[in-house]
Image (tube, rainbow, N blue to C red):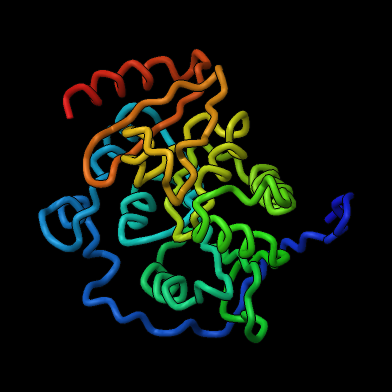
Amino acid sequence: MKNLNGLYRIAIIFILLVCVQPVLSADFEFKAEDLTYDFLTQPGPNHIAYIPHFKKIFNSIKIKTLLEFGENDGTKFLIDSCNKVISVDFITHGYGPGTFQSYLSLFAECPNWIPIAYFSGYQGPFPYWAPYKHLASEHVYKACSYQTVSHKSYAKIDDFYRIELEAFIKNLIKCHKIDLAFIHPILYLRSDLIELLFSKIGIIIAYDTNCRAAAEPDDVYGYYHLKVPEDYEEIFLPGGAGTTVWISKKEMYQNLRDELRIYALML
């Protein structure tokens, strides 16, 4: 990796290691094969509101490789629908590895799933248990902590965390031709992630965007301040906490844009 120029000159270490250490056992009451479309969309505690939206998109355009920031039960539907799914989970001093480790166990038999642990401000032994890992500085953790408390972007104070995140994303794109990016991590820097993905990935989706649709200026994710470039179209899909899709205005996405506009009116 090349060192980043600037005040801190911190080298980003991107390590893709396949480890032999076993992951911790999951405590789920179900198995991965139970996470079908019907299971995830039925009323109840396992219902995931955005899954039908993804089914609509997958029926409209072929998604070979999907990049997901965050993971949950719905990740299984994405794995079943795409050739490859890359899930990035952020492990920090405030948000430990427990959930990520559980999904490592749950989806262990899914050969087309690439789970990457992004460590920032992590205080613990070297994570041999993570099959793919990215060891970053504490700047992402600091920026997230600041935004969580203040609901303001840390970029005005120090934007180095954005430099690190962009370098990480660029490295992923160098290694994988990504067709769609999905943003729903526990990390609250969702607006930053979306802005860094513009011009790099043609289809970007984020969940929990009702606050943006309602133009609420005080939202923890920073959606209100998100600036959409002119070459992307924004489409809001109601349901649950709200899903928003940003699609490139390139000709290759014309049919998808047309179909999602009509689909949104029917929801």
Image side of residue 134 versus residue 185, left or right: right
Q: Residue at x 54, y 55 (%)?
A: 147
Quadrant including the C terminus: top left
Work out whether 202 lies above or below 239: above
The answer to whether residue 248 is visible is yes
The answer to whether residue 15 is visible is no
Q: Position of residue 181 (x, y in %)?
A: 49, 42
The quadrant where residue 47 appears? bottom left
Comparing 81 with 266, the one in front is: 266
Q: Residue furthest left?
A: 43
Quadrant including the N terminus: bottom right
Q: Residue at x 54, y 51 (%)?
A: 189
Work out whether 265 lies above or below 40: above
Image side of residue 224 versus residue 17, left or right: left
The quadrant where residue 259 appears? top left
Q: Position of residue 100 (x, y in %)?
A: 46, 71
Q: Residue at x 56, y 34 (%)?
A: 201
Q: Residue at x 55, y 64 (%)?
A: 90
Image side of residue 127 versus residue 266, left or right: right
Comparing 233 with 212, the one in front is: 212
